[in-house]
Image (spheres, grey):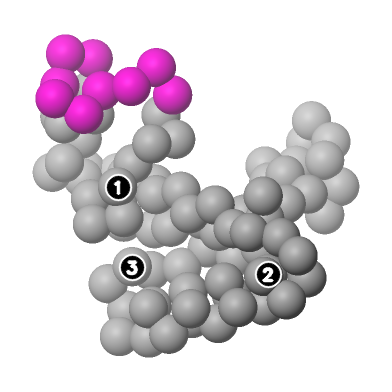
Amino acid sequence: MSNSKTSRYSENFIISLDPKADDFEILLKRIREMSHACGRGIRVRGRLGRNNPNRGLYAAGGPLWRCSSQDIRVEDSVRVDIYLK
């Protein structure tokens, strides 16, 4: 995928996963092994999604608020995006 203004993902985007799926940990481990074999690491970034009950934690004034909306914990996310470092 190209890194143009019309593209949502960066060139380092690999896949989007459901953290509540049974095989999430297995897939994450395999992706991590493959990226390390290529000499690169991965970055795991959670997404809150719509109507997430944890949204208040990350809103301005919440205990987990950050300037970057990219610092969502995996356990609070609906989907997880995996990127190469």
Q: Amino acid at mark 2?
A: Ser
Element under label 2?
Answer: helix
84 versus 73 height, above or below: below
Is residue 63 located in the magenta-colored stretch of the structure? Answer: yes
Q: Find the magenta span and give its range.
A: 60-68
Q: Which residue is mark 1?
A: 73
Q: Compare residues 41 and 75 and report the one nearer the observer.
A: 41
x and y percent of residue 85 in the render?
Answer: 67, 50
Q: CA distance from mark 2 to mark 3?
A: 19 Å
Residue 83 inside the magenta-drawn segment: no
* Label drawn at residue 19: 3
Indicate the position of residue 75 as horizontal and vertical percent values: 23, 57
**Quadrant of the rendered structure where residue 10 is?**
top right
Dot 1 falls on a residue whose secondary structure is loop
Question: In the figure, residue 39 lies in which quadrant?
Answer: bottom right
Q: Disc 2 or disc 3, which is closer to the eye? A: 2
Mark 3: which amino acid? Pro
Q: Label 3 near label 1: C-beta < 8 Å?
A: no
Front residue of 49/15: it is 15
| Label of residue 15 in the image | none
Determine the image quadrant of residue 32.
bottom right
Task: Name the N-terminal-most of marks 2 and 1.
Answer: 2
Q: Main secondary structure of the magenta part?
A: loop
User: CA separation, marks 1 and 3?
Assistant: 11 Å
Looking at the picture, how far across and down is residue 21, in whole percent?
A: 32, 79
Residue located at (46% from left, 68% from top): 17
Residue 35 numbered mark, or none? 2
Q: Residue at x 38, y 36 (%)?
A: 71
Mark 3 residue element: loop
State which mark lies toward you, 2 or 1: 2
Q: Amino acid at mark 1?
A: Arg
Residue 3 drawn at (x, y percent): 82, 40
